[in-house]
Amino acid sequence: MTDTASKTHLTRGQVEDLHRWWRAANYLSVGQIYLRDNPLLKEPLAKEHVKKRLLGHWGTTTGLNFIYAHLNRAIVDRDQAMLFVTGPGHGGPANVANAYLEGTYSEIYTRFGDDEASLRELFRQFSYPGGIPSHAAPETPGSISEGGELGYSLAHAFGAAFDNPDLVVACVVGDGEAETGPLSTSWQSTAFLEAARDGAVLPILHLNGYKIANPTVLARRPEDQVRKYFEGLGWAPRFVTVADPSAQPQAHRDFAEALDDCLDAIAAIQTRAREAESAGERPRDSVPEPWPMIVFRSPKGWTGPAVVDGKPVEGTWRAHQVPLNEIHENPEHLAELEAWMRSYRPEELFTHDGARSPELASLAPSGNRRMSATPYANGGRILRDLKLPATDAHMIPVEAPGVVRAGAMTNLGGWMREVIRANPDNFRLFGPDETASNRLQDVYEVTDKVWQERIEDVDEHLARAGRVMEVLSEHLCQGWLEGYLLTGRHGVFTSYEAFVHIVDSMFNQHAKWLKVHRELPWRMPVASLTYLLSSHVWQQDHNGFSHQDPSFIDHVVNKKAEVVRVYLPVDANTLVSTMDHCLRSRDYVNVVVAGKALSLQWFSPAEAELHCARGIGILEFAGNEAPGEEPDVVLGCAGDVPTGEAIAAAQILRRDLPDLKVRVVNAVDLMRLQDEREHPHGLPDREFDALFTKDKPIVFAYHGYPWLIHRLTYRRTNHGNLHVRGYVEEGTTTTPFDMAMLNRIDRFHLAIDVLDRVPGLALRHAGLRQRYMDELAEARSATREFGEDSAEIRDWTLEPR
Amino acid sequence: MTDTASKTHLTRGQVEDLHRWWRAANYLSVGQIYLRDNPLLKEPLAKEHVKKRLLGHWGTTTGLNFIYAHLNRAIVDRDQAMLFVTGPGHGGPANVANAYLEGTYSEIYTRFGDDEASLRELFRQFSYPGGIPSHAAPETPGSISEGGELGYSLAHAFGAAFDNPDLVVACVVGDGEAETGPLSTSWQSTAFLEAARDGAVLPILHLNGYKIANPTVLARRPEDQVRKYFEGLGWAPRFVTVADPSAQPQAHRDFAEALDDCLDAIAAIQTRAREAESAGERPRDSVPEPWPMIVFRSPKGWTGPAVVDGKPVEGTWRAHQVPLNEIHENPEHLAELEAWMRSYRPEELFTHDGARSPELASLAPSGNRRMSATPYANGGRILRDLKLPATDAHMIPVEAPGVVRAGAMTNLGGWMREVIRANPDNFRLFGPDETASNRLQDVYEVTDKVWQERIEDVDEHLARAGRVMEVLSEHLCQGWLEGYLLTGRHGVFTSYEAFVHIVDSMFNQHAKWLKVHRELPWRMPVASLTYLLSSHVWQQDHNGFSHQDPSFIDHVVNKKAEVVRVYLPVDANTLVSTMDHCLRSRDYVNVVVAGKALSLQWFSPAEAELHCARGIGILEFAGNEAPGEEPDVVLGCAGDVPTGEAIAAAQILRRDLPDLKVRVVNAVDLMRLQDEREHPHGLPDREFDALFTKDKPIVFAYHGYPWLIHRLTYRRTNHGNLHVRGYVEEGTTTTPFDMAMLNRIDRFHLAIDVLDRVPGLALRHAGLRQRYMDELAEARSATREFGEDSAEIRDWTLEPR
């Protein structure tokens, strides 16, 4: 593909069609920003027709409308399935305008029709109290990418393209968002997209030159430099430059040529790859063909006011938001606004009653081919349930608690392998180079890691096709997965617990998306986004302080309760049961935290299923209360390591204080601790009181920062007696047992906490505290002596009941 | 600069010097990973000399040692000030080895000398319980960049180079971390580095080919493609490729040539820019010269075992961590380890007593020129206090509370302008294209935004030099600022409140860095990292749900109390006072949240200073208790919008219930709420009880998620009576008043909360609840009627007492 070899020659009629659509979309966009009445300009524009407060973003909108019109032409010409991803922030007016022109808006929001009143309402609702935001959002038909926080469009586009061989994802990338880290790393996704089985992404970098207040880096670099940048990233950029804003027919011809060339190039790449695939000719040492992309340089706020109050606006940062202001105070501005709007000749675009003119409809694709109506953008419509293997076949026989040792993650790997085997085209595992480090390596028995660059003999489990996506970018993992889920597929993101904070903000935006998505009846449920976090705070060994952070859970539980779920399985069997549950769920974010070290197992398969179904329960094997009896103290626990320590603490107490009635309560579903009014999984107060008593001391060993447990339980009857131990940022490069000890969640500190909290106990057994301190010291020295073997140390005193 | 035009021709002696240093550093690195005894291999290696658990990362270390040796040669040759930033994760053994060889390690950690016992201890402590982590960390002399979480090295390097004209920052970038978003966006920093006044960054991209388990994208792309990528980013890459691992003298010659060429090119660029600057010839339309960089392709684990158990290791991902394992069980491996270690010929490197051989010392720079000892890496050593303008000159006269309107951020802009004027070379303002949007535009009266690309006539406040750094990447803002602070300067990061979560994880790592840094006596205090968050959750107008997130505060308060401070100034004067305090502070992370809308002012300058000094206090003008009297109810508040609503609620209650004694307490320093045992700013219980009473209802209006207030106060006497309102994820595109109402922190809901909580009140005044609901409805309709003017609406019923 070169810049000159195009075969596209638009007829004059085609140019007019494109231009008409563009004018209509621009008109609707300006109307949204400005008007509260007189939507067809049947009367001379008066200030009372104009909103008092003008909010919105004109600058990027006109370029989006231009591109949308051209994509529509290509969709109709080629009967091509296409998804539109809007990268530039605040391009909302464009998405809404085009969806309205395509008829989708009125089909979804049936209070809208095809008449003047609907236009008035379309204009009024925009950026208006109770209305719609000024960027693409879940409310926007055809969107899978929120335009509020920038930088994720291209990763979403790739996620949408994976395993959708017939789809082209047209992704408009703003030159502002192109400066962000997540967008910068997204260009390298070509190394992970397979031409034979995946669809294609067609990025359209929109160089309109400015952000809110500054030029953009890419727009100010010489074209040759920009070309090298993209060629270096595996793309073949095609430049379309609007040198003269008034030469619009030429711009249409140039863009149409470039677009056709790119779509031809995509088809050619796919054909070659698919033929080679069929013929079994996919050399390991090949380099991927460069994928086409468009670099579209057009003036910011194109077709808007060129000059306002003597200052240039079109083509500058001044066009970013509302180019003409103070309409109510400044009659000249009012006149300029009217002239601007009339320049689109609304009378040719809409009938006297406000219906779209028949000529407009000629350009729109029909039915599901409309980008605003494509099922790819409403993934629940095409979601297929996963085929999930039976969990019991992948659980470990556990005849008694605390006897068998296993690695929960290693065991889960076997189950995940079967998930992958049974779902070869709609499930993927995403992670930053850590799938094996997190012990899921069994999946490589049935699949590989996707890789399109050169493969060498020394590589293992690396192939053109596969179900595992590994790239050293949490942003890409998250962005790809979001795009994959929102287009109707399933997946899991595995990460080190501490570093998943890298995508805190992406989680925020996805959780917010889901909250709104759930409120929209036309958005069908999608698979949940499940985080599987391992290599957690208690098992860092040599990694130390920088790798210790359990507060992603804290971050997650701030979001709407109906969207978030948090699970802390305590052994291999509860982990399998939990993951099975998560992969069946819809419209949630699930956070699962599980250790990867070898550790004691507590639950038989049946017990694990039951415990996970309940989410919280008494560990009868660990305590010593008689049935029906109220204990003297409750040891609460959540998380694998704290639970092991709580069980050991109970054992120590039983050894030394056989008359003390100890109950151990474990929460595998953390949200059970919260009030039922606060979270759908919350226990009713009566049940909570039955577990934790109304007045006995509770010593709670928690996986993360201790105050989270207080935050979840502050309304509970017995909160005043709750004492929580957790991670308090102590310890760095040391053994897991030492970590537990430094943060005082180890068995000895817990036992001392019980001594201190059961009335009279410390006094009656004055020697015990010292004994536990001595045993603690002994354990610590044993820790060092044993030479840093974590499993060996952590379990050293533990015997089954 | 071309790949062939070098003038460097190393003598044989120079090659030997370099090689000797490299051998020594490699030997010390292997020793750290493996040995617990016999550090000089005086005896045949036996398994009891080897650690039982082998932890560490060999793969990247040898390349780092190679580069370090070469940088040392150049430093000595040129008497060049240089800072070494270690990008690759887990390169810790290299940093420690080189610091030890330079003598710095023993100078700082005086338990180490220059003898066999010190070597033994150096080896033992590594990745050992209570020892040091396996990556660069605050404990590592010469480091400003933690090697735990990857991707920030290059941004740190640029931050270090700004305003340090004599410094070259050599930044080794791992090809793994090069895949991350933050690193990908960091390459474009050339658009923001000024050759005339800043130092230089010399990136050395280390293509050793593999991450933990995968090849890296850049290493597998053809050289021509990689060249284009970097040329596109504004760099002139110089490739040094080690084709034959055994041809080490040639590798030394090649690297030395490339390094000299790059340093010459840097000097030439700087000379041209500085001469042009002196001559006043800095054209606005010029394109920055490409900066030199090195792409160093060398085998992963170079000089380590080539093959282990028949599988290739050197040059593959198998060299990533510990290349030879099971030393205790496998005598062959033990023998291979010994052969490997002896291949460095330790007897030539160290004396019989374990001292460094005199020949080694010849390569090391001396004193502060040693990269492990440079003051640039211990910025507190060269920190100069800011010259801060008097705050009172920038405060607004406020004769009575609630009369004057002002924009707190706009007003702060004037003070910030003076900060910038008074500190032209050691203070910068960082932000993602939002300085003006956040209303600090007054700073442009004395400075500009830094920009090295083409400048056009339409641009405003854009210049080659300036104090404002704007780029649409929160990652870059944060990374630059961290590098700038850790090398002894000052700065502020301004951002929209919701989107600062983008750098949650970078904050984590910086806070962890500071925690350890504070514990190290040799690390001198540095300026605090201050976040100034505006455009907050309550003032989003058209932006809506995606822009609403107040939980960065929640994230921050999970970190060690001695490191974090959170301030919620309530008006213009308290904001100036707060920022003045923050810019004087050291070794903290300060979070300041302040609105940018026009709003009522409460404090005179003197009152503002006093209130901020106390951090929390009674707003006497708002309540109606008599001095010394205990109130019937306390209205607590924190944050500008909630405080306005709490004051208004108190006014409504006074109007309707003159006998009800209402107290309003505002916390501007949020951590005053916490227990003094939990946070250094925490109020003693006695003082807390005096403010909030021991038994009266407290209705608290808070800026963020309400549970944070519970988490901070759950130990307080009166916590059972505390009722908190805050943001609960309601509302999207709507007016600020509507937002307050939907989340129930508005004056009417607060007044109803008081009715519901003061015993008997609701019963005695049965009509009031309905009245407030009516007034609420009226306010809501007024909100719509007024046409979305936030300030007007929010204050509509408010009159001064």
Image (cartoon, coloured by chain):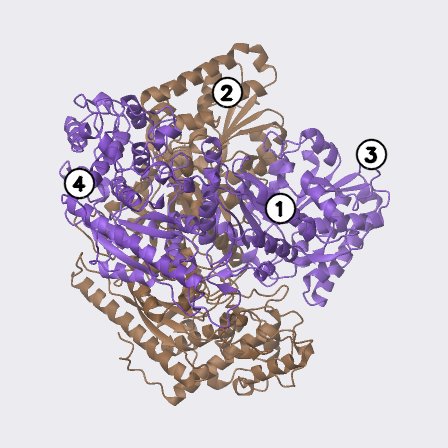
Chain colours: A purple, B brown
How far apart marks 2 and 1 lie (CA) works out to: 47 Å
How far apart marks 2 and 3 lie (CA) works out to: 46 Å
Work out whether disc 2 and disc 1 sit on a shared chain.
no
How far apart marks 4 and 1 lie (CA) works out to: 57 Å
Contact (CB < 8 A) between labels 3 and 4? no
Q: Amino acid at mark 4?
A: Gly
For the residue labelled by badge 4, is the local secondary structure a helix, a strand or a loop? helix
**Pair 4/1: label in front:** 4
Q: Which residue is painted at 36% across and 33% down in the image? A: A133
Contact (CB < 8 A) between labels 4 and 2? no
Q: Is residue A629 left or right of residue A1?
A: right
Q: Amino acid at mark 2?
A: Ala
Give the residue number, with chain letter if any, for mark 4.
A13
How far apart marks 3 and 4 lie (CA) works out to: 85 Å
Q: Which residue is painted at 81% across and 53% down in the image? A: A800
**Pair 3/4: label in front:** 4
Image location of residue B660, percent across then percent down = 54, 16
Which label belongs to residue B751?
Answer: 2
